[in-house]
Image (tube, helix red, strand yellow):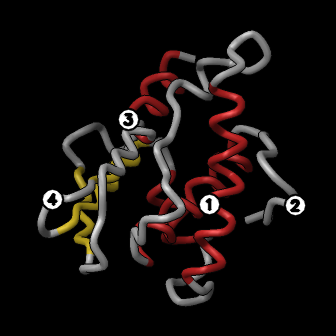
Amino acid sequence: MKNKLYVLTLILGLILISCSTQKATIVKDKTLNSTSSDTIKIVNEELEYEVIIIDPGFSFWLNSMAQPRGFYTQSYLETKNQLYINEWNNRFYQPERYSRDLYEMSIDYDPNIDYGYEVNYLIYNYMIYFQNNYRQRLFGRVPLR
């Protein structure tokens, strides 16, 4: 459980401060033991936002199971992310019902901000991975991959 707590703390270091539509840079950090965790960091070139996802197996899952970039439209990803994140935050604010090991922090996602395709793609895929890996259902039918 501590591993999940650590992982979710860092993954939901989805520090979405603000954004521009410029291309984001993805940096994979293998400084941690690659068998227990991996890191995907999305940084705007101007450092206006930063998303850090650390979860054991997510990078492998993303490369092997997720639909390729361009498969979904940005508007589809934004809609799904808004639904998933709203439910995530609802669960975060109900610690008596939902485990803090899974929903450790809320996610600051503003639907009025254009985070760009890459950020939305990675958040969406993490939400799918999270739901399948931790057997959670945030909203509607979850693609099994």
Q: Quadrant of the C terminus?
A: bottom right
Residue on which the image places disc 2? 141
Q: CA distance from mark 2 to mark 1?
A: 14 Å
x, y percent for residue 120: 49, 68
Query: Earlier along the polypeptide chain: callout 2 or callout 1?
Result: 1
Pointer 3 residue: 10
Circle nearer the N terminus (3, 2):
3
Q: Gap between marks 4 and 2, in whole Å? A: 35 Å
Classed neighbour count for the residue bearing mark 3: other residues with Cα under 10 Å, few (<14), some (14–19), many (≥20): some
> Comparing marks 4 and 2, which lies closer to the viewer?
4
- Residue 122: horizontal and vertical position, in percent? 48, 64
Gap in Å between the C-alphas at discs 1 and 4? 22 Å
Side of 70 relative to 142 (left or right): left
Q: Position of residue 25 (x, y in %)?
A: 22, 71
Under mark 4, the amino acid is Leu
- Determine the CA span between mark 3 and mark 2: 26 Å
| Secondary structure state at the residue bearing disc 2 | loop
Q: Which residue is mark 1?
A: 81
Residue identifier under label 4: 47
Q: Nearer the viewer, mark 3 or mark 1?
A: 1
Mark toward the start of the polypeptide (4 vs 2): 4
Query: Residue at horizontal 62%, vertical 27%?
Result: 102
Q: Determine the secondary structure under disc 4.
A: loop
Circle 2 or circle 1, nearest the eye = 1
| Dot 2 amino acid type | Arg
